[in-house]
Image (tube, helix red, strand yellow):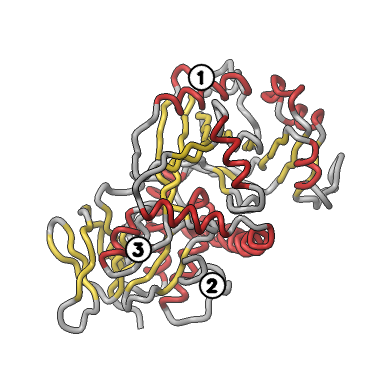
Amino acid sequence: MPGEVCVVGAGVVGITSAWFLAEAGWSVTLLDRSGVAQGTSLRNGGQLSYRYVSPLADAGVPVKALQWLLERDGPLRWKPQADGAQWRWLAQFVARCRGSVNRRTTQRLARLGEHSRACLHALMAQQQLPPFAWQQPGKLVVYRTPALLARASAGLPAGPAPDDAVQQRWDVAQCLAHEPVLQGLAGRLAGGIFSRDEAVADCHAFCFALMQRLRAHPRFRGLVCDRALGFEPGAGAARLQLRCEAGVLGADAFVLAAGIASRHLAASAGLRLPLYPLKGYSLDAPIGAGHVPPRASITDFERKLLYARIGERLRIAAMVDLVGEDERIDPARLASLLRIARADLPAAGDYDQAQPWAGLRPATPGGAPIVGASPVPGLWLNVGHGALGFTFACGTASLLAEAMAGRPTTLPLDGLAWGADT
């Protein structure tokens, strides 16, 4: 039977976990050192990218990574460190860079994405959430290389799509007709794939919208703003308790959903989580009357860069830096991101007024999150979402709540449970 649960982490994964657990009958306390959505959920890419969930680990990626490292504005930077966690993660990542592994993981994540979409839409309909800039403008992935486009679009219809076609391949003219903002790239594009049912939203605003409903939930016990230091054996019947700066918290169960901080907290309970921070950057550029922002969200496949209109702002997100837990904004990387945006989509927003941000995306080597029970009694996991935390949050939270209630999960946790990517 549900009892008292403490969810550690008040980003999008933690808040959705708290909501679905409260709905499942748990009395929920939420803990975060900084408050609501102040970490990676603050300014992530904003795409709810349910169809584009292929993990980074794939055949040929190690060779591509070496090329990216040599490019001035390449999407990858790596700072080798005397850190066993970095080298273990890299070794596990390379071991998963096989086409068969990628295809299997992609299929699982695609099912998770569809489940998460359904959970979010049900939540929006049932709870009438305050606005969080959600819209469904579709997503256009543009390719510069004909061979890459041909491989990615195999089996998709080209030309005018029938009414029931969710995805289609577009030539350059079709891309430009839908997105005039791409005009400056016309001579460098091979075409694109348009998905009409993809969405964008403000993740930070979503967290506050759901938090508003959570605060009114009869089984929500409150948000504790404190820094978790580590787990220790519980007193009496409690299996675990959590030591924080202000004291000790006890509960019948704990859920780790604290991003990259989850690995340090898990280590205090004797558990090594296979997580490493993938540092990413974003820019928020105001959209004025003279700008031509994209209608759909746009992903530049080769550049590994995305553009999404969120309200009256253009969100530009990119880059993977393996530099440990350094959250500082690297001026060179920021300059690189601005240089690309100005050159490729010069009229999309006011880049002179763009606000920069950097955050740490907690990723597993294989790209799938870890959801469900841990080997430590009383400790549950909802971690490792990488760059798809907003996309998967409602889905993994609902599966976690089902697992903690002892019910069969809507989707099998095969490939997501502890041990699948450890």
Give the answer, above or below, for where 350 lies relative to 62. Answer: above
Q: Secondary structure at mark 1?
A: loop
The first of marks 3 and 1 along the sequence is: 3
Q: Residue furthest front?
A: 82
Q: Residues within 10 Å of mark 2 (few under 14, many from 20)?
A: many
User: Which residue is the site of mark 3?
Assistant: 256
Q: At which x and y percent is residue 288?
A: 53, 19
User: Which residue is the site of mark 2?
Assistant: 413
Q: Nearer the viewer, residue 225 or 143?
A: 143
- Inspect the image, locate mark 1, and give the three-letter code of the amino acid beneath it: Asp
* Mark identifier at residue 319: none
Asked if the residue under mark 1 is in contact with the one under mark 2, i.e. CB atoms within 8 Å, the reply is no
Q: State the image quarter where residue 170 is shown.
A: top right
Is residue 206 toward the left or the right of residue 174 in the image? left
Q: At which x and y percent is residue 405?
A: 42, 79
Residue at figure coordinates x 58%, y 63% from the top left: 112
- Inspect the image, locate mark 3, and give the three-letter code of the amino acid beneath it: Leu
- Inspect the image, locate mark 2, and give the three-letter code of the amino acid beneath it: Leu
The first of marks 2 and 1 along the sequence is: 1
Q: Nearer the viewer, mark 3 or mark 1?
A: 3
- The residues tagged by marks 3 and 2 sit, at their Cα atoms, a distance apart of 17 Å
Residue 399 is at least partly visible in this image: yes
Residue 128 is at least partly visible in this image: no
* Mark identifier at residue 350: 1
Q: Secondary structure at mark 3?
A: strand
- The residues tagged by marks 2 and 1 sit, at their Cα atoms, a distance apart of 44 Å
Q: At which x and y percent is residue 283?
A: 47, 30
Q: Nearer the viewer, residue 171 or 339?
A: 339
Asked if the residue under mark 1 is in contact with the one under mark 3, i.e. CB atoms within 8 Å, the reply is no
